[in-house]
Amino acid sequence: MLHHLIDPILIMIKDGVAAWGYLAVIVMMAIESANVPLPSEAIMPTAGILVQQHKMDFHLAALAGAFGCVIGSVPSYFLGLYGGRPFLTKYGRYLLLREKDMETAEKWVDKFGDITFFVCRMLPVVRTFISFPAGVLKAHFGMFVLYTFVGSLLWCYALTYVGIVFGEHMEVFTDIWHKFDLAIVVVCVGAFGYYLYRHLKHD
């Protein structure tokens, strides 16, 4: 079955975080926030499982995740600040960013101001790519960092808690995964493939 291939990968991720601890969380969340689609939805729950096993601290895990988000977001912000729309037009598709994404970000900022970057840090997918538009739109750097940290902290707390709950009921979730592993993977891969198609195709 498919889970025989996937389970070792999940164990390897867990063992990696267990071995490197908070540093692993910081590095992986930094990558996730630097326009690389490495899902925080997999990183932080893994830390949560280790919290449930008393191998990590709940608050420190969430703080490490938020700190990593800030580290990864800053280069992306300055890339947008100094590269601007010309960079977006030429290379945006390689960062899974489209002109429509930029226009959407502009509308949100026009309507809600810099608080947009706080809200976006708690939205799946969008949170990964919002730093570049923030730079293009010349968001106040100090406020951008603050909103990135606070929004990411709340997001990391939530996902870490999900991991704790998963750890407490791992046998139930594992049984469900083993019964429906193929369907789960097909849906996830299909959704991610559609997202890539929408962002890599010419507008």
Image (tube, grey):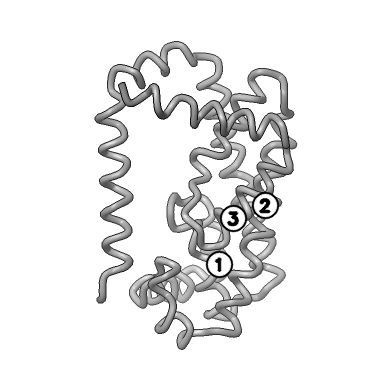
Q: Are marks 1 and 3 in contact (CB under 8 Å)?
A: no
Quadrant (top left/top right/bottom left/bottom right) for the C terminus: bottom left
The residue tagged 3 is: 31
- Residue type at tag 3: Ile
Query: Could you say which quadrant of the image residue 121 lies in?
Result: bottom right
**Residue visible at 36% across and 77% down in the picture:** 99
Image label count? 3
- Residue type at tag 2: Gly
Q: Which mark is residue 8?
A: none
- Residue type at tag 1: Ser
Label located before the other in sequence (1 or 3): 3
Quadrant (top left/top right/bottom left/bottom right) for the N terminus: top left
**Residue 170: x %, y % from top left:** 49, 16
Q: Are marks 3 and 2 in contact (CB under 8 Å)?
A: no
**Residue visible at 59% across and 33% down in the picture:** 160
The residue tagged 1 is: 131
Residue 89 in the image: above or below residue 100: below
Label located before the other in sequence (1 or 2): 2
Residues packed near mark 3 inside 10 Å, few (<14), some (14 to 19) or many (20 plus): many
In front here: 203 or 142?
203
Task: Compute the Cα span from label 3 to label 2.
Answer: 8 Å
Mark 1 secondary-structure assignment: helix
Mark 3 secondary-structure assignment: helix
Q: Is residue 116 left or right of residue 147?
A: left
Task: Compute the Cα span from label 1 to label 3.
Answer: 13 Å
Residues packed near mark 1 inside 10 Å, few (<14), some (14 to 19) or many (20 plus): many
Mark 2 secondary-structure assignment: helix
**Residue visible at 26% across and 39% down in the picture:** 187
Residue 67 in the image: above or below residue 45: below
The residue tagged 2 is: 68
Query: Could you say which quadrant of the image residue 58 lies in?
Result: top right
**Residue visible at 53% across and 80% down in the picture:** 136
